[in-house]
Amino acid sequence: MSFTQSLIYMIKNSSWFSKLILLILFFFSVYCLALIISRYRYYKQLVKERLRIRRYLRTHPEGERLTLTRKGNSPYYFLLRLISRGISRQELKSKTDQIINDFLVEEETKLSFLATTSGVAPFIGLLGTVVGITRAFWSIGLKGSASLLVLAPGLAEALITTIAGLSVAIPAFIAYHYFINKLSLIEKELVNLIEEVISRMQRTG
């Protein structure tokens, strides 16, 4: 019997409580995966938006207004839209600060599930571990024997939930810190762009 077949067999023969633990961790992993994919694609889009506004600044040295050809939901798009309106420097600074703050709050709220999962999943797995070990000792008490045949089912059940908890928590932990670093970089890029735009407005004003 292969390892995969053995794993499936152990899951099928585990207690209902361990199956519930595994089901909860499964839903956590699915949601985390969907969140990771969506945030990765979104931040990849932001890179394109940044390049677009950089091209605009290079090709419009005299501060001509930008004609937007499409809509977007990124902070770069809102910055471009503000620039295209030709508003004052003070108004631009005020509005862009609010845009950046709203963007960061919204993204950090979305990413908080990854942080929660990385912290909670190991404990959920540990709960299944404790139940599995308890089941193993209970079997010893019932059968009056401490043989491997008696201990194995409960210990296997305990290890499965431990593995599941760590398998969910580790990717969530890595992804959370990766995206937080991305957000920090995006924030710096936005601030630099705003300062550059305001500086150009001062020269042309």
Image: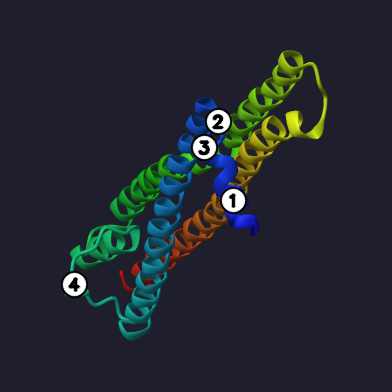
Q: Judge the density around disc 1: few (<14), some (14-19), many (≥20) Cα neighbours within 10 Å.
A: some
Q: CA distance from mark 2 to mark 4?
A: 55 Å
First of labels 3, 1 by sequence position: 3
Labels 4, 1: front one: 1
Image quarter for residue 127? top right
- Check the picture and name the quadrant holding the N terminus: bottom right
Q: Amino acid at mark 4?
A: Leu
- Check the picture and name the quadrant holding the C terminus: bottom left
First of labels 4, 1 by sequence position: 4
Q: Position of residue 57 (x, y in %)?
A: 36, 78
Q: Which mark is residue 68?
A: 4
Q: Amino acid at mark 3?
A: Leu
First of labels 2, 4 by sequence position: 2
Could you say which is closer to the camera, residue 29 or residue 50? 29
Residue carrying label 1: 177
Could you say which is closer to the camera, residue 71 or residue 157? 157
* Residue visible at 53% across and 54% down in the picture: 184
Could you say which is closer to the camera, residue 94 or residue 116? 116
- Residue 88 visible? The answer is yes
Q: Are marks 2 and 3 in contact (CB under 8 Å)?
A: yes
Q: CA distance from mark 2 to mark 3?
A: 6 Å
Residue carrying label 3: 22
Residue carrying label 2: 18
Q: Position of residue 113 (x, y in %)?
A: 46, 39
**Lateral position of residue 19 relative to residue 134, left or right:** left
First of labels 3, 4 by sequence position: 3
First of labels 2, 1 by sequence position: 2
